Amino acid sequence: MAEKTDPLVVTKSTGEKVTFSIGKLRSSLSKSGADEEQIQEVLQQLEPALYEGIPTRKIYKLAYGILKKISRPTAARYSLRQGIMELGPSGFPFEKFVAELLQAQGFQTEIGVFVDGHCVRHEIDVIASKDGQRIMIECKYHNLNHNKSDVKVPLYIHSRFKDVEKVWPSEKEYEIRFHQVWVMTNTRFTEDAIRYATCMHMHLVGWDYPAKGSIKDMVDSFELYPLTCLTTLSHTEKQKLLDRKVVLCKELLHNEALLRQVGIREQHLPSVLHEVAGLCGR
């Protein structure tokens, strides 16, 4: 991509105007598995379509469309954030996705567990256990990138945690039920949310927060890509799999029968399985 005399100004989803960074786009493509030749191809095809004020969302769509023609597994990794957005509208797929990320790190998990608090009964999205520690995890799913979890989220969840943290066998004695409380979201947290959570010793995990151990880091480290990233499946086919409580690409590995059950045509199976294998490192 040729250097321009004047920096290109682009429009973020929030409406904010910022200078377009070729370096950030390069980095994003590289982290998705694109090699230098593929990156150059994307940049060269993308350049004629750029214009002053172009929405960053359109740049993503254009780059994604070019990548699909070059390498579908790379395009699928590039669309990870959008793929996670498509785990809705119900919360269960995202909760299962979070549980799978934790299981890959040695946690035992339970999803959608009801527990009695000191005052009222609560449904806990995910309970994770490891090394004698039990963690209460609340999942905040958003279907738009710019929707952030603000300070009201950790405030509310912390109050629920305090109600279920202890079990009281008697008025004077108690046992610890949960040792920690985490909040996990597919987008980001506001600064106030982070400040409050830090003060209250809550652990926050977002799309790219913290710097190490974010959702993006976990997915890339363990190759646990949601099936909604796949470029070879239609929206309807993806939804049919989600309805069967199938969330991850790895669940489709060597599972032609499941793909046939949701209506994947016989001649289309090889391309789907090839993309799945490319994402799962097989």
Image (spheres, helix red, strand yellow):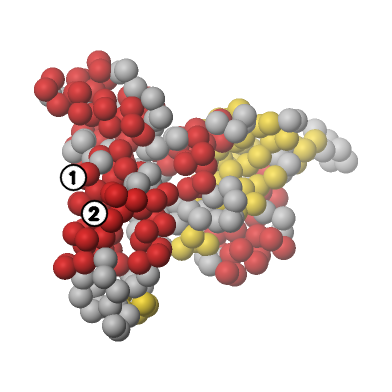
Q: Which residue is at 61% across, 63% downward?
A: 194
Quarter of the view holding residue 126: top right
Residue 41: give its label: 2
The CA distance from mark 1 to mark 2 is 11 Å
Q: Quadrant of the C terminus?
A: top left
Residue 182: give its label: none
Determine whether 31 is above or below 239 in the image. below
Residue 231: where, in percent of width, then height?
A: 23, 40
Q: Which residue is mark 1?
A: 69
Secondary structure beneath dot 1 equals: helix
Determine whether 154 is above or below 228 in the image. below
Badge 1 crowding class, 10 Å Cα cut-off, few under 14, some 14 to 19, many 20 or more, is few
Dot 1 or dot 2: first in sequence order is 2
Badge 2 crowding class, 10 Å Cα cut-off, few under 14, some 14 to 19, many 20 or more, is some
Q: Which residue is at 66% across, 39% downward?
A: 135
Residue 195: where, in percent of width, then height?
A: 65, 67
Residue 13: where, in percent of width, then height?
A: 33, 69
Determine whether 56 is above or below 79 in the image. below
Residue 82: where, in percent of width, then height?
A: 33, 51
Quarter of the view holding residue 253: top left
Determine whether 93 is above or below 40 in the image. above
Q: Are marks 1 and 2 in contact (CB under 8 Å)?
A: no
Q: Is residue 113 left or right of residue 129?
A: left
Which amino acid, by three-letter code, is at mark 2? Glu
Q: Which residue is at 75% across, 30% downward?
A: 132
> 94 or 62: nearer the eye?
62
> 240 or 167: nearer the eye?
240
Quarter of the view holding residue 158: bottom right
